[in-house]
Each structure stands twice: as C-alpha cells, then as structure tokens.
Amino acid sequence: MDINSRVILNQNIFAQEVDGEMVLLDMQSENYFGMDAVGTSIWQALKEEGGEIANVLERLSQMYDADRQTLQKDLLAFVENLEKNGLVTKS
C-alpha cells in the first residue's frame, strides 16, 4: 500500500455515524468495528474520494494541523488495517 494506491470499500459493510464516531458492521462475518473521529473522517473521505488515497491525504492535510509526512504514515497504516480486517480491498 502506498500513497498512489486506490482501495474499494467492502460492499458488505453497514456504516453508521453515531455521535461523531463511525460504527461498522461486516454483514458477512458479523464483526463490529468502531472508529474515532479521525477514523470516521478517513472512512468518509475514502468513500467520497473513490478510494484514492492521495486525495484522502489532501483532504486530511486541510482538516488537521499535522505535518504531511506524519499524516501520510498514519493514513497508510490505517488503510492497511482496514484491508487486514476486510473492510477495503486494494484496487
């Protein structure tokens, strides 16, 4: 996974925002996942940006006061974790 990667959100995921945090249910495995406010921002950006990680990074850099290198590292780690849990697949 790198900054030029694109991911596809798993279509079997039901996502609902509750009090600024995202709750995800994998309808196949019946596993629940919770995301804090930052994770919620990333999930929504992935959805709105068609899974283009570079575009998500641009959006996050406008939202958060952090250096770009740290944002990129954290974003890639987060997306890799999503992939590991079957919530996204690399395109």
Image (cartoon, helix red, strand yellow):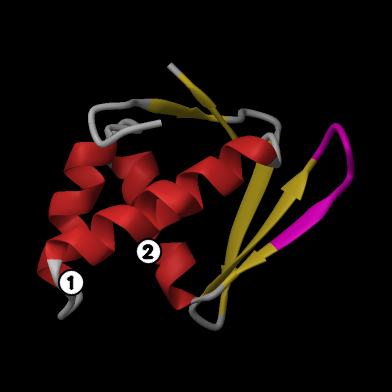
Callout 1–callout 2 Cβ contact below 8 Å: yes
Quadrant in which residue 75 is drawn? bottom left
Residue 12 position within the rendered picture, expressed as x and y whole percent measured from the top left? 70, 31
Residue 78 located left or right of residue 57: right
Q: Which residue is mark 2?
A: 41
Mark 1 lies on a secondary structure that is helix
Return the disc, 1 or 2, that comes first in the chain's sequence. Answer: 2
Residue 39 position within the rendered picture, expressed as x and y whole percent measured from the top left? 47, 65
Mark 2 lies on a secondary structure that is helix
Within-10-Å neighbours for mark 2: few <14, some 14–19, many 20+ = some
Residue at 14% from the left image edge and 70% from the top image edge: 67
Q: Which residue is mark 1?
A: 63
Reply above or below: 69 against 30: below
Q: Which residues are magenta?
A: 27-33
Residue 62 position within the rendered picture, expressed as x and y whole percent measured from the top left? 10, 67
Q: Main secondary structure of the magenta part?
A: loop
Quadrant in which residue 32 is drawn? bottom right
Residue 35 located left or right of residue 38: right
In the rendered structure, does residue 78 fall within the stretch colored magenta? no
Reply above or below: 37 against 34: below
Q: CA distance from mark 1 to mark 2?
A: 9 Å
In the rendered structure, does residue 31 fall within the stretch colored magenta? yes
Residue at 41% from the left image edge and 71% from the top image edge: 38
Residue 80 position within the rendered picture, expressed as x and y whole percent measured from the top left? 52, 42
Identify which amino acid the numbered label 2 is placed on. Ser
Quadrant in which residue 4 is drawn? top left
Q: Say which of 25 and 62 sits in front.
A: 62
Is residue 87 visible to us here? Answer: no
Residue at 39% from the left image edge and 41% from the top image edge: 47
Is residue 59 visible to us here? Answer: yes
| Furthest residue toward right | 30
Residue at 25% from the left image edge and 47% from the top image edge: 56
